[in-house]
Image: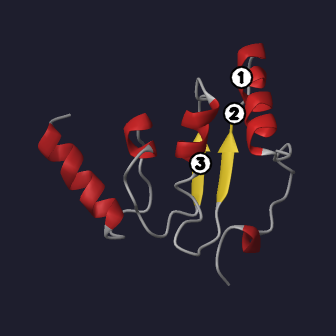
Amino acid sequence: MSQEERLTRYKGFKEGHKRILVATDLVGRGIDIERVNIVINYDMPDSADTYLHRVGRAGRFGTKGLAITFVSSASDSDVLNQVQERFEVDIKELPEQIDTSTYMPS
């Protein structure tokens, strides 16, 4: 994909014309986009810092957010444990049912 096409798609997402953006770690740092409610990490980042920057896109600017990360290996679990220890959080397994009020405004 050309740089021009990437910028066009990013702009469409940022302005709210598009609702889904599939991105690399590039979007995880330094790009502020309002109204990001859900971040899905198909692969676990390789560090706690990268994880924080990725999931930090959800719930910004006073909005609610949800981050879902697929943990599929021992190394993924290691990074998840590092995140929990470093940022003093308890990350739960995704429940069968999610109340949308936890990540979407009413």
What label sits on residue 70 in the rendered view?
2
Residue kind at label 2, given as amino acid type: Phe
Q: Quadrant of the rendered structure where residue 4 is?
A: top left
Under circle 1, the secondary element is helix
Residue appearing at x 23%, y 44% in the figure: 6
Left/right placement of residue 89 relative to residue 63 reads right
Residue identified by numbered label 1: 76
Q: Which quadrant is the N terminus positioned in?
A: top left
Residue 15 pos. (x, y %) = 31, 70
- Mark toward the viewer: 3 or 2: 3
Instruction: Tell me what residue is drawn at x 86 percent, y 46 percent.
Output: 90
Q: Position of residue 74 (x, y in %)?
A: 78, 15
Q: Which mark is residue 55?
A: 3
- State the residue lying farthest toward the bottom: 106
Mark 2 neighbour class, 10 Å CA radius: few under 14, some 14 to 19, many 20 or more: some
> Which is more toward the observer, 43 or 61?
61
Query: Gap in Å between the C-alphas at discs 3 and 2?
Result: 13 Å
Res 79 → quadrant? top right
Q: Which labelled disc corresponds to residue 106? A: none
**Element type at mark 2:** loop
User: Is 15 on the left-hand or right-hand side of 75?
Assistant: left
The residue lying at 85 percent from left, 42 percent from top is: 93
For marks 2 and 1, give the CA distance.
Answer: 8 Å
Q: Is residue 93 left or right of residue 87?
A: right
Q: Label 3 amino acid?
A: Val
Residue 14 in sight = yes
Mark 2 vs 1: CB contact within 8 A: yes
